[in-house]
Image (cartoon, rainbow, N blue to C red):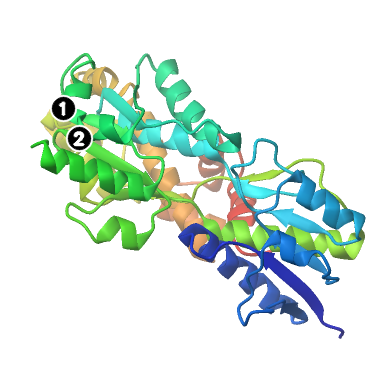
Amino acid sequence: MDSIEIALAMDYANPFVRAVAEGVARYGFQQGNWRFYAPKGVPEVLPRELKNWSGGGVIGMLDRDAVSNLWKRGIPAVNIFGRFSELPNSSVVVDNFEIGRAAADYFIEKGIRRFAITGRKVFGDMTLKYDGYISTLSARGFQCLELKSRQSIQNLAAEFQSLEGDGPVGVLATEDPVGRTVIDACLDSGLRVPEDVAVLGVNNDAFACEMLFPQMSSIELGAERVGWQAAQMLDRMMKEKWRPDEPVRIHPEQIVERHSTDLTALSDKVVASALRFIRENAHQPILVNDVAKAAHVGRRTLENRFRALLQISVHDTIRRERVKRACRLLKETDMLVEDLSESCGYTTRERFNQAFKQETGITPSNYRKKFRFRD
């Protein structure tokens, strides 16, 4: 089998990009005949360094012009960088809108009612991160403070005075290093994390998130999955001379919770107790009455408190927690869906499928295909 030379036009200084490269490498190893172009000893080149290169395909941080120029030379190319104002159709990128939406939902489920986001960078696909966060909050009736500069972050206490209401402020830091800056500013100004300010980063870089106290929660983006699917797209382009009609956007993997957001409905201990019971028993066929009994209140009282604080019913909370468990099992195990549904508290696969699709929009089988490293 003849080898195919693949070039990676990436900046390995970025931890997200390094993880993308790992996904590409996993796919390439499976093919058996991929060889990565490494003119300097490592498989990393700049797009301009490919001017006289004549390999099989390119994956990297490539704008529309770069992809177009490579195609004119008969070289398929896939972009993995989401900051361009116009993405090439042959792109596999993280869904930035979904990052913002997930962060907003996460804070709301925590009982947070005041919100902020670190300064908007008005360029390209990245603006969708802000749009997802702010529009989701707006749809639920909440406003959002934008911390527009490093100076505004350093003056958090003064900035937060413009926010109405009481309780902690949920801050989405659009990158992990910025989140560290927010936490440092909180500690310098006497604000407690997470009691006064809950901080959520983006990318889940362990170096940035764990080498501080309190450690920072962050959104895991699924960079390896981006790399795998980018390689899969390139493989098809090379074999079939096929060109995609639109970019592929990958949903973020999960929110990895650490101390910076470790609070649960602090303003209502009954709701906190109920949520804890649901999370600890999502694998059981529990009912709303079971939750009310565990929280030592009547069902109607519990329902009213859930809706007032979290804007969601107890039943829907149970379903959401079960589906979260199912999503993790679908991605990380080979359990049959029949067995998995029982492990998530459902007595029949039909009821599980219905609940899963209601929550995610797709069936469990399609979810597994979408999120596993497989064809």
**Residue 205 horizontal side relative to residue 112, left or right:** right
User: Farthest left residue?
Assistant: 190
Marks 1 and 2, the one that precedes in the sequence: 1
Between 32 and 65, the residue placed more toward the observer is: 65
Residue 373: x percent and y percent? 61, 64
In the image, residue 46 sits, relative to residue 311, either above or below, namely: below
Quick one: quadrant of the C terminus?
bottom right
Q: Which quarter of the picture shows residue 72?
A: bottom right
In the image, residue 20 sits, relative to residue 318, either above or below, namely: below
In the image, residue 311 sits, relative to residue 343, either above or below, namely: above
Mark 2: few/some/many CA within 10 Å (<14, 14-19, 20+): many
Q: Which quarter of the picture shows residue 184?
A: top left
Residue 318: x percent and y percent? 35, 37
Are circles 1 and 2 on residues that touch, CB within 8 Å? no
Rounded to the nearest angstrom, the CA distance separating label 1 from label 2 is 10 Å
In what element is the residue under mark 1? Answer: helix
Disc 1 residue type? Ala
Q: Please name the residue shown 25% across and 17% down the image.
A: 308
**Residue 252 horizontal side relative to residue 54, left or right:** left
Between 39 and 1, the residue placed more toward the observer is: 39
Q: Please name the residue shown 74% across and 80% down the image.
A: 35
**Residue 43 horizontal side relative to residue 351, left or right:** right
Q: Which residue is mark 2?
A: 197
In what element is the residue under mark 2? Answer: strand
Between 83 and 373, the residue placed more toward the observer is: 83
Q: Please name the residue shown 70% across and 41% down the image.
A: 87
Q: Which residue is mark 1?
A: 157
In the image, residue 265 sits, relative to residue 51, either above or below, namely: above
Disc 2 residue type? Val
Q: Please name the residue shown 72% across and 69% down the image.
A: 7
Residue 130: x percent and y percent? 47, 30
Pair 1/2: label in front: 1
